Every structure is written in C-alpha cells, then in structure tokens.
Image (cartoon, rainbow, N blue to C red):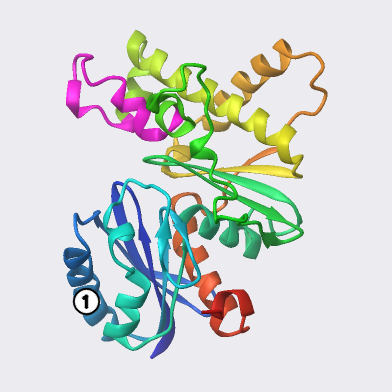
Amino acid sequence: MMECILTIDIGGTFTKIACISRAGKLEGKKEIETPGSCKSFLQWVQNQFKTYSKKYSIIGIGVSSPGSVSSTGDVLGYSSVPFVHEQNVKQLLEEYFKLPVFMENDANCAALAEMWNGAAATIDTYACVICGTGIGGAIVINKKLYKGANLHGGEFGYILLDREFSASSTWSELGSSSAITRRLKKADPYFEKWSGPLVFEQAKAGHPEARKSLDTFFQTLAVGVFNIQYMLDPEKILIGGGITRQPGFLNELSKKLNEVLASKPFAEIRPSLSLCHYLDQAQLYGAAVGWKECYEKGDTVCLRD
C-alpha cells in the first residue's frame, strides 16, 4: 500500500479531503459543504478515513483551518467556521485516530505549498492573498512563515479599507469572493442564486450590476495588493483561491492595479503578481508539507507544547 498523509481543508463554504503521498501526488479528492458542527465534521472524516484506508496506508493527518491556529490546535481570532474555535480539532483527531496531526491556518498552508514546488519555489520573501469566503493571507520572510506575536501575521482580511470603520469595511467584507455574490442578492435574474461563475459570465454579457460587483472586487484586491507591497516590500505577491480559475483573472487585476498606480505617481514599485500554482488545492498540499516538516524533520516550533 502507498503511504500517504490524509489532508483536510476546512473552508468557509466547502471542506475538502484527499490523500497526498510522500512524493506529493494527490489522490482521491472529495468535497462537501462544510459541516455545521464538530460532531458532524468528525463523523464525515471517520467515514472518509475508512474508505481511504482500504487503498492507502495513512501515516498522519494534515489539517488546513481558518483562523489563527496555535501549535496545540487552539484556533484564535474569528472565522466563518465557528466549530474550529469551539473545540480543539487537532486534539480530537489525534485522540480518535491515534495518528500525529498537523494543523495550520489555511493561508499559511497555501504559502507552504507554494514554497515547496509552486510559484514561490525560487524566492525567499513573499506574501499570499487567498480569496475565498473571506480574505486569508500569509507572509513568508527568508523562507520562514511569519506568524506574528499573536498569530495574526498575514491576516489581511482584517485590514480596514473604508473610513466608516464599520463591520463591513474590512477587506474580507468588501473584497472576498463571497462578497461578489452577496452584493447581488437583490439583483435579477438570479437573486439569492448568484454564483461566482455566473457573475463572471453575466458581467461579460453586459449585466451592469454583475460588472459593478466584479469591479468592486478587483478594485479592492488591487488596493490591498498595493498596501501589502508598501508595507512588506516582498519579492512577489501570490493570489490564490478558486476564483483565480476564472479566465482573464490576472489581467483584470492588473488593469485595476494600473489605475491605482496611475493615481499615485510617487509609487514607483509595481508589485510582482502571480497566481498560486496549486490554486484551490494549495491548502491540501500545504497541510501535507506542514506535516512532513513537523513530523519527519522535527520542527521544534511545530512540536512544542
């Protein structure tokens, strides 16, 4: 049997699971709507574990989670998945499966994947922006994750982008993938049934409200990228999340970034942008990379109590 790491990506909308071999081959990816409780999450993982165990020898579990994840599995801060804050998922999985479990913030996992053999394999300092239900972020300095004094390093979603300072003025509220459809809930012909692909499709066909919502998304992303460049001055800024699969994504972002730069003639440094190599699978790969770093190389930060 091929040895593999069972990797789980807990997202605000969907949760994915797969087996990743030591050589980095992803097998048998599955996806469900994110469970509403830790109990239903564990039941689903148990069922999937039984299925994968028939074909693979599972040597450990890697988990990508929203929120600020401590080395012991406690999740601080705020996220769109309440159960990861209410119960220690890492400890729960370790106790049930009797296997070593690695758990890390989802954007940090994406950054680890890209460092391994993705879009950041040849650079030392970069930032990741992950566009999903919210905005996730990660900072890597000299090939090391920078997690900050309170595990909030790279939490770009909290950045305020509106002078009103309301709850809806953060980058996550204004510029996440979910914000695109949220702005269209009262717009015909789909109302509550708008989806990301539909917005892109209708915007291309000339739907004014769909176009406006996309413009807001790309404008917000461009401003955020500009701010990151001048706060951190990284070699590269990587953009990830399922939305980046949309045709012309990077071109749309570049156009908005051109507008931002044109309005600030003193800003001479243009951010170097790339899409994450692993796109919406980055968190799965990153969870496996983190597990290998922790349990095969014995990272002291990972293993501390």
Q: Give the range drawn in magenta.
A: 175-197
The quadrant holding residue 177 is top left
Residue at the image point whose x is 72% and y is 61% from the top: 143
Give x and y (percent) for residue 29.
34, 64
Q: Is residue 213 shown to the viewer in this render?
A: yes
Instruction: Count numbered badges in the picture.
Output: 1
Residue at the image point whose x is 70% and y is 48% from the top: 126
- Return the residue nearer the eye: 283 or 89: 89
- Residue 265 position (above or below residue 170): above
- Residue 236 position (above or below residue 302): above
Give x and y (percent) for residue 124.
76, 56
- Residue 97 position (above or below residue 131): below
Residue at the image point whose x is 66% and y is 17% from the top: 260
Q: Is residue 262 left or right of residue 196?
A: right
**Residue 149 part of the magenta segment:** no
Per the image, label 1 sits on a secondary structure element best described as: helix
Residue at the image point whose x is 59% and y is 62% from the top: 112
- Return the residue nearer the eye: 41 or 48: 41
Q: What residue type is labelled 1?
A: Gln
Q: Is residue 268 left or right of residue 206?
A: right
Give x and y (percent) for residue 188.
20, 14
Q: Is residue 204 shown to the viewer in this render?
A: no
Q: Residues within 10 Å of mark 1 (few under 14, many from 20)?
A: some
**Residue 193 part of the magenta segment:** yes
Name the quadrant of the N terminus.
bottom left
Read off the residue under disc 1: 46
